[in-house]
Image (cartoon, rainbow, N blue to C red):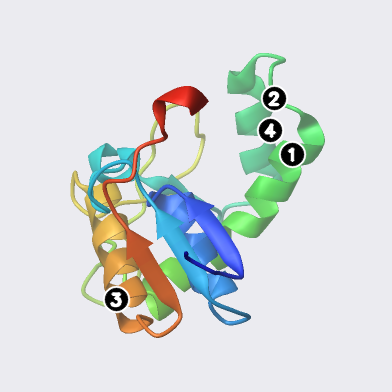
Amino acid sequence: MLETDYLVIGSGLAGLYFALRASEHGRVLVATKRAPDDANTTWAQGGVAGVLDPADRMEAHIEDTLRVGDGICHPDTVEACVREAPAHILRLANELGVAFDRDAEGHFELGREGGHTARRIVHAKDSTGWAIQEALLARVSERGDRIKLLPNHPPRPEYR
């Protein structure tokens, strides 16, 4: 029998990021249906958007997102995500060790993609997802006393 304070289903970005936070408060079990590095995060090639350039504005990022969302995005959710994004990107880079591309001075090399009107995309070459996954798994392994990975545990047939 396994006991845990927090059960996380899946080892992608959301699951591992939460597991690291939750491990500050209790024991965490991360169950995956495949290997821990076999998550959709691994395959993400694009970057992560956030207002990190002093010349950029949160309001512009919100406007861009709502415009390309074409009425499907909930404005309050967009605003919350945009406002919180820079802190999470900085945590991924500075605390969790994601190797985002940087220039000679150490600033993020910001790209401009999709419907963005400013350079606000951080990348790790063309393998941003893999860089995030690799860094998160490394941090999880360092917390082996608090986080247990349970790979190759797909849902039982009666739950499908």
Q: Quadrant of residue 142?
A: bottom left
The image shows residue 15 at horizontal and vertical percentages of: 47, 54
User: Marks 3/1: CA distance?
Assistant: 32 Å
Mark with earlier residue (1, 4): 4
Mark 3: few/some/many CA within 10 Å (<14, 14-19, 20+): some
Q: Is residue 45 visible?
A: no
Q: Secondary structure at mark 1?
A: helix
The image shows residue 144 at horizontal and vertical percentages of: 35, 80
- Do residues under tags 2 and 3 come within 8 Å of each other at their CB atoms? no
User: Marks 2/3: CA distance?
Assistant: 36 Å
Q: Which residue is mark 2?
A: 73
Q: Secondary structure at mark 3?
A: helix
Q: Amino acid at mark 3?
A: Ser
Q: Which residue is mark 1?
A: 77
Q: Amino acid at mark 2?
A: Cys
Mark with earlier residue (2, 3): 2
